[in-house]
Image: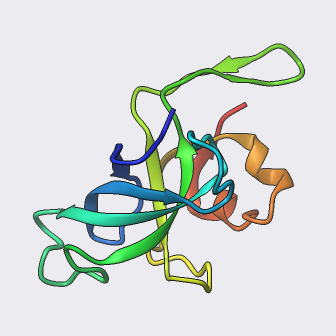
Amino acid sequence: MIQKNTKLVVADNSGAKFAYCIHNLSKPNSRYAFIGDVLLVSVKQLRVRRRYASKIKKGELAYALVIRSNIFSNYYFGDRIKYFEPNVILFYKKTYKLIGTRIFGFLPASFRYSQFLRLLFICTGSAV
């Protein structure tokens, strides 16, 4: 479960390494965010090799999409998926245009039926 002040790992090549959740934009009255929700995050740490050529700077606010969470996700055909840590990918504010050009790791196939279909084409693979 992701809530305010949760430390998130950034899973794209935007240059950020860690971000902290500030607010849940998909469900503003909900306490927790799950896979597929959009968050407002603050970038807290940059990747070492991309620090100077980063597309985003430390302390900036950005929108983020939750792609993995460390709680179980149940699917209607009986599968349960759990990841080790909560991961997000970063967007430019209010345009939902991706900052990075690649996504590291797998994505759940549930993004195939959402408005973020483009993510499946730039990630390394797709899980269940």
Relative to 103, is 5 above or below? above
- The mark tally for this picture is 0
Relative to 22, is 94 above or below? below
Q: Is residue 66 left or right of residue 20?
A: right
Residue 48 image-quadrant placement: bottom left
Name the spot of residue 24 as percent of width and height, x first: 56, 56
Do we see residue 102 in this rendering?
A: no
Residue at position x 80%, y 52% from top? 112
Name the spot of residue 109 as percent of width and height, x first: 74, 42
Relative to 28, is 76 above or below? above
Do we see residue 101 in this rendering?
A: yes
Residue 56 image-quadrant placement: bottom left
Name the spot of residue 51 as percent of width and height, x first: 13, 74
Residue at position x 76%, y 17% from top? 79
Name the spot of residue 40 as percent of width and height, x first: 47, 65
Quadrant holding the C terminus: top right
Residue at position x 58%, y 43% from top? 33
Relative to 61, is 127 above or below? above
* Figure coloring: rainbow
Q: Nearer the viewer, residue 30 or 102?
A: 30
Q: Is residue 102 left or right of residue 10?
A: right
Q: Is residue 52 left or right of residue 11?
A: left
Q: Residue placed farthest to the front in the image?
A: 29
